Amino acid sequence: MIHPLPGPSGQTVELTRIAGLNVLFVMAAEAEYGPHLAALFRPLLCGIGPVEAGVTLTRALGVFLAQGTLPDLVVSLGSAGSARLHKTGVYQATSVSWRDIDASALGFPKGITPLSGLPATLPLPLRIPGVPEASLSTGANVVSGAAYQTIPEDMVDMETWAALRACQGFDVPLIALRGISDGDKELEGVHDWHEYLHVVDERLAEAVGLLTQALETGGMAALRP
């Protein structure tokens, strides 16, 4: 199922059929989409950062809703940074927070979106058997070096909170898979992000294989903890 997205990008969005279910794979950037993942699916490229991710995924889900083909599952995947997890390891997020929302000057705790009724941390309840688990922090900044000391979550990215909120607006479940590309040292340039993306690509593909196996064995029920 391939649908054009409205707007000037010309991008199309495609659902992947797995065990009778429609799955939408979402990635931030082409650099993260290597040959191992390319052999499995064609992703929606949502762009880097929470604004681009939220806008693009919401627009895509709106297209599917209009066609009567909302996905059964959205899988957000790509790279992440971490100062404590194994570099090139792949983890599924058990929860996600929004690290740079801060209305504390108005009396709201940092991390709380004012007047939304949302907690600072949102759970991601689905689980792929065999994939290690970690907590995730989303924000609009690239984290490096000592900045990790201010973040309690295990890993950081720039899209998952926004992707989850888009999915919640359409009542579609989300799984977030992240491969650790950096974080063990201070970043010195974009090459530090790119250096291990080829390994992350291969290991993310292995995690997608475990997802496929679980869905083929037990459908969505196989992803319940």
Image (spheres, rainbow, N blue to C red):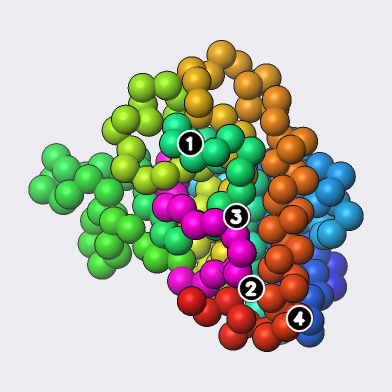
Q: Residue at x 29, y 64 (%)?
A: 118
Report x, y in % for residue 204.
70, 51
Depth-wise, is mark 2 or mark 4 nearer the camera? 4
Q: CA distance from mark 4 to mark 3?
A: 19 Å
Dots 3, 1 in contact, CB < 8 A: no
Identify which amino acid the numbered label 1 is placed on. Answer: Ser
Q: Residues within 10 Å of mark 1 (few under 14, many from 20)?
A: many
From the viewer's perspective, is residue 30 above or below residue 112?
Answer: above
Report x, y in % for residue 135.
42, 52
Identify which amino acid the numbered label 4 is placed on. Answer: Glu
Q: Identify the residue under disc 1.
A: 82
Which SS class for mark 1? loop
Counting residues from the N terminus, which is met first, the one under dot 1 or under dot 2? 2
Quadrant location of the N terminus in the rendered image: bottom right
Q: Identify the residue under disc 4.
A: 216
Counting residues from the N terminus, which is met first, the one under dot 3 or under dot 1? 1
Counting residues from the N terminus, which is met first, the one under dot 4 or under dot 3? 3
Check residue 73 in the rendering and tell me which mark sits there, or answer none: 2
Q: Across the whole image, how many numbered discs are drawn on residues?
A: 4
